[in-house]
Image: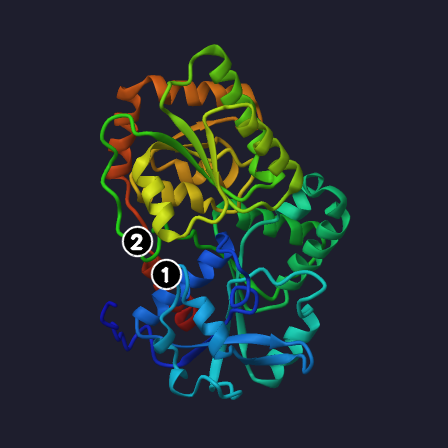
């Protein structure tokens, strides 16, 4: 464990961090990684931090339980003993704080409403700072099947509510524009200050791997199995390359992700049953995932829309070239180098991108050099910017 770096400018007062879903969810998806990575970064900067959840009976905040804190510590999460109240973790007393930080998505029927949160904040004299992840359920409701209408309405209410709080930090310039445009369309005059503060490219708690040597044994895709992540196009592109004899023998496509949609799962299982060189890791832990990155000659992330694109960032962190979308936040992330961007909505473009990287070692080397030359933002950099904005209203 690293030494705690106490910085009197950045630390000082206590911050509350909302961990309600992350403290009990059995997966470590992108939002959960954000919660864990930022909490750990603040701890290691010496910030006094207390994890809190929503008590649905009392409609109020309370400290996370010891079991919830242990769950948060998984997947390179925040240190169990470095919470500000770790010596009395079984207490139900909130520490005196001026700010509540909300990294999670707080939307839907099982979450507090905007009115409940505002009432709670007023009663405790708390200001709220939020991370806005994306407008995808609203902009691409067609990808949510039978839940499209409820997902869209719920997300719209959440985005309206953000205008009522104090500070909203979007995870990319793209998502900041989406939220700003939504507020304008809804004729809202926001109280909130909205700023773009992109996430880190660091894979929290894991040292960077060296660049791959030679061709590697796998092409890696890290993404939950759901329609928006666009596995359908990836499987079409992959199957076509195999049928044409353009997919090298000995090279496997490896999918890492939890089964979030039965239709996508069925397609993956069918591709495996046909004998294609395809593997699916449903529950890869940190060690397994690191080993897969080590084996990868490059990565592919075929998602149609992201708020930021953590799998792309983490591919670059491990010096692996990544194929991703040439639109939106993913294009924004890719612009600093190390990615091959294509129109992922077109499976033939995705196929051509895969074929290009497989067949062109010089191009992979060129993109590898771009990765080594691009500046990499750490979670501590993001955490410091949050703190500076909270304290002074300015970026570091």
Give the x, y percent position of residue 357. 36, 22
Q: Is mark 1 on a helix, strand or loop?
A: loop
In the image, residue 24 above or below residue 356: below
**Sooner in the amino-acid sequence: mark 1 or mark 2:** 1
The residue located at (70%, 72%) in the rendering is 115
Give the x, y percent position of residue 288. 37, 47
Res 170 seen here: no
Which image quarter: residue 379? bottom left
The crowding category of the residue bearing disc 1, from other C-alpha atoms within 10 Å (few below 14, some 14 to 19, many at least 20), is: some
Q: In the rendered view, does 95 fall on the left or right side of 46?
A: right
The residue located at (46%, 62%) in the rendering is 35
Q: In the rendered view, does 296 fall on the left or right side of 305?
A: left
Give the x, y percent position of residue 378. 32, 55
Q: In the rendered view, does 372 fall on the left or right side of 87?
A: left
The residue tagged 2 is 206
State the residue in front, 70 or 18.
70
The residue tagged 1 is 76
Give the x, y percent position of residue 238. 50, 23
Which image quarter: residue 381? bottom left
Q: Furthest-top residue in view?
A: 244
In the image, residue 37 above or below residue 291: below
Question: How many marks do you count on the picture?
Answer: 2
Res 331 seen here: yes
Q: Do the residues labelled 1 and 2 touch (CB within 8 Å)?
A: yes
* Structural distance between the alpha carbons of marks 1 and 2: 8 Å
State the residue in front, 44 or 92.
92
Which image quarter: residue 73? bottom left
Name the image quarter holding the C terminus: bottom left
Q: Residue 157 carries which label?
A: none
Q: Is mark 2 on a helix, strand or loop?
A: loop
In the image, residue 387 above or below residue 302: below
């Amino acid at each position: 464990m690293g030494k705690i770096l106490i910085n009197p400018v950045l630390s000082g007062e206590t911050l509350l961090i909302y961990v309600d879903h992350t403290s009990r969810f059995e997966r470590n998806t992108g939002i959960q990684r954000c919660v864990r990575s930022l909490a750990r970064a603040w701890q290691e900067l010496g910030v006094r931090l207390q994890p809190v959840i929503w008590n649905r009976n009392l409609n109020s905040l309370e400290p996370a339980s010891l079991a919830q804190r242990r769950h948060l510590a998984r997947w390179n999460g925040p240190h169990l003993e470095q919470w500000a109240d770790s010596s009395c973790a079984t207490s139900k007393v909130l520490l005196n704080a001026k700010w509540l930080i909300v990294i999670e998505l707080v939307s839907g029927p099982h979450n507090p409403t905007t009115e409940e949160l505002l009432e709670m904040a007023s009663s405790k004299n708390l200001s709220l700072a939020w991370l806005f992840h994306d407008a995808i359920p609203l902009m691409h409701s067609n990808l949510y099947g039978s839940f499209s209408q409820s997902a869209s309405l719920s997300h719209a209410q959440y985005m309206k509510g953000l205008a009522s709080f104090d500070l909203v930090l979007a995870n990319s310039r793209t998502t900041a524009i989406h939220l700003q445009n939504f507020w304008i369309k809804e004729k809202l005059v926001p109280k909130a200050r909205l700023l773009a503060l992109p996430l880190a490219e660091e894979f929290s708690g894991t040292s960077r791997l060296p660049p791959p040597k030679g061709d590697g044994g796998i092409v890696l895709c890290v993404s939950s199995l759901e329609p928006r992540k666009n596995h359908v196009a990836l499987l079409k592109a992959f199957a076509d390359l195999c049928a044409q004899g353009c997919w090298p023998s000995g090279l496997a496509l490896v999918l890492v992700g939890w089964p979030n949609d039965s239709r996508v799962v069925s397609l993956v299982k069918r591709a495996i049953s046909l004998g294609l060189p395809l593997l699916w890791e449903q529950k890869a832990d940190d060690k397994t995932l690191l080993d897969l990155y080590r084996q990868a000659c490059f990565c592919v992330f075929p998602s149609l829309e992201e708020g930021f694109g953590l799998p792309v960032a983490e591919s670059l962190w491990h010096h692996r070239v990544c194929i991703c979308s040439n639109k939106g936040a993913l294009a924004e992330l890719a612009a600093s180098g190390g990615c091959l961007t294509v129109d992922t909505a077109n499976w033939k473009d995705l196929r051509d991108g895969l074929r290009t990287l497989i067949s062109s070692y010089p191009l992979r080397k060129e993109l590898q050099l771009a990765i080594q030359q691009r500046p990499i933002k750490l979670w501590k950099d993001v955490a410091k910017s949050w703190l500076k904005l909270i304290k002074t209203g300015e970026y570091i």
